[in-house]
Structures are given as structure tokens and as C-alpha cells.
Image (cartoon, grey):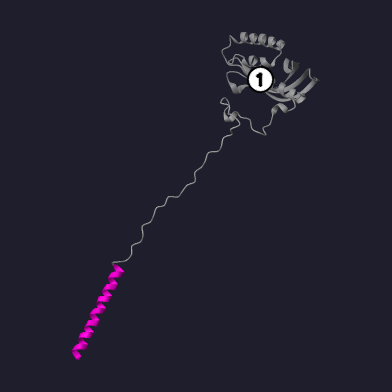
């Protein structure tokens, strides 16, 4: 009787050990592996090109920058500016500065540059004046020049659309070989401007 109980106890212990071993085996060595990740590509939307306007054929001679845009200001619709006394004063001041600034080293090019702003009478005078200046400076090797800066201007006489006389006050400085040695001084110049076929041109300029 005791032997049977002893054998039964041993059998139960052995079965318990086998069951525990089986559980351990199933839990550790037969653990389910995770499913591999699937690299799914994101479907990208297909961008369709903008439809072309079939009714209008593009002009190959026109670049995109040349094509007119809606709402662009049309300068031709602007009222034509009418020259007034202030405009003539500014013209005379600019002319006086260039007319009074010259040097023998620049071959008195300021006078030729101003010819497009002169009447035919004034151009003839300027050509003769420059010829005299060049003759007198041929024997001189040293530099001589004058710089002129307009200070103010005022109308002396004005006939609308026809003629104007402007007095311009300028500051001048004469320089020799030593450019900084000249003393500055104030001088007036009387400039007559005539309307020739719609263009205001200088007809005379006299230093006062």
C-alpha cells in the first residue's frame, strides 16, 4: 500500500515537471514572430497640365513679357504737359551750369554738347566762340578750367508759348594747374529761350 502511494506521488511529480517543461518550451521557443512590415508606396496624385485656350493661337513673335496686361496705365491718355515758367527756369539753370563749366583739357566740349539745345543763331555764335578759345589756349600748356553751379533763377520776361528771358545766378570757380587754388564767386547770366516748332531752345546767353 505504501509502495503504491509512493509510486503515485513520484508519477505526479514527473508529470508536473513534464507539463511545466512543455509550457516553458511553448512560451519561449514557439513564440509567434511579428509579421514583416509592408512598405506601402503612397499613391501620389497625378498633376494634369492646365488646358490651353484652343480659341486663341499664340503669336510666335511675341514673348510673354511683351504681352499686354489688363489694367496697365495707358500713357497716351495723359494730358500733354504745357510748359510753364517753372519749366523754363529749370531749363535755363541746367543750361547755365553746363554752359559755364569747361576746360582747355576737355577741348571745350561742353559747347558742342549743348548745341542740340541751341537755336541756329546760338550754334553759330558758339562755334565761333569755341574757335577763339582754342586759339588762345594753344600756347598754354597749363590746365585752365571753370566749374559753375546754378543757385537760383527768375523770369525777367515771358511771352507764353513764344519766348522767355531768364536770369540765372550761379557760383563759379576758376582753376589753373592747382585745381583747388581758385576762388569762387557769384555771377549772373541772362538766357533767352525761344519756342521753335514746339521745342524751347536757347537763343542767347550773356554773362552779367
Provide the secondary structure element on which disc 1 rests: helix
Give residue 17's position: percent from left, percent from top. Answer: 25, 77
In which quadrant of the rendered image does the N terminus lie?
A: bottom left
Residue 191 versus residue 208: which sits nearer the camera?
191
Image side of residue 113 versus residue 19, left or right = right
Q: Callout 1 environment at 10 Å: few (<14), some (14 to 19), or many (20+)?
A: some
In which quadrant of the rendered image does the C terminus lie?
A: top right
Q: Is residue 8 shown in magenta?
A: yes
Give residue 159's position: percent from left, percent from top. Answer: 81, 19
Indicate whether 140 appears above or below 174. Answer: above
Give residue 108's position: percent from left, percent from top. Answer: 62, 14
Residue 85 versus residue 72: which sits nearer the camera?
72
User: Residue drawn 71% across and 11% down?
Assistant: 120
Q: Which residue is mark 1?
A: 98
User: Residue drawn 69% across and 9% down?
Assistant: 124
Magenta residue span:
1-28
Where on the picture, by quarter, is residue 95?
A: top right
Q: Is residue 46 shown in magenta?
A: no
- The secondary structure that most of the magenta stretch takes on is helix
Where on the picture, by quarter, is residue 176?
A: top right
Give the residue at the far left of this rendering.
3
Indicate whether 156 appears above or below 129. Answer: below
Question: How many marks can you see?
Answer: 1
Give residue 77's position: percent from left, percent from top. Answer: 72, 28
Amino acid at each position: 500500500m505504501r509502495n503504491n502511494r509512493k509510486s503515485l506521488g513520484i508519477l505526479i511529480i514527473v508529470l508536473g515537471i513534464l507539463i511545466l517543461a512543455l509550457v516553458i518550451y511553448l512560451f519561449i521557443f514557439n513564440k509567434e514572430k511579428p509579421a514583416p512590415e509592408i512598405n506601402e508606396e503612397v499613391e501620389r496624385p497625378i498633376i494634369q497640365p492646365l488646358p490651353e485656350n484652343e480659341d486663341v493661337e499664340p503669336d510666335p513673335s511675341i514673348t510673354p513679357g511683351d504681352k499686354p496686361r489688363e489694367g496697365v496705365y495707358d500713357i497716351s491718355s495723359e494730358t500733354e504737359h504745357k510748359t510753364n515758367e517753372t519749366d523754363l527756369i529749370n531749363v535755363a539753370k541746367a543750361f547755365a551750369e553746363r554752359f559755364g563749366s569747361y576746360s582747355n583739357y576737355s577741348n571745350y566740349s561742353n559747347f558742342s554738347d549743348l548745341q542740340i539745345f541751341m537755336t541756329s543763331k546760338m550754334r553759330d555764335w558758339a562755334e565761333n566762340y569755341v574757335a577763339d578759345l582754342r586759339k588762345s589756349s594753344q600756347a598754354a600748356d597749363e590746365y585752365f578750367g571753370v566749374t559753375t553751379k546754378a543757385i537760383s533763377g527768375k523770369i525777367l520776361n515771358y511771352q507764353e508759348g513764344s519766348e522767355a528771358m531768364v536770369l540765372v545766378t550761379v557760383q563759379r570757380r576758376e582753376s589753373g594747374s592747382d585745381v583747388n587754388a581758385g576762388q569762387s564767386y557769384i555771377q549772373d547770366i541772362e538766357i533767352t529761350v525761344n519756342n521753335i516748332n514746339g521745342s524751347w531752345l536757347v537763343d542767347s546767353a550773356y554773362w552779367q
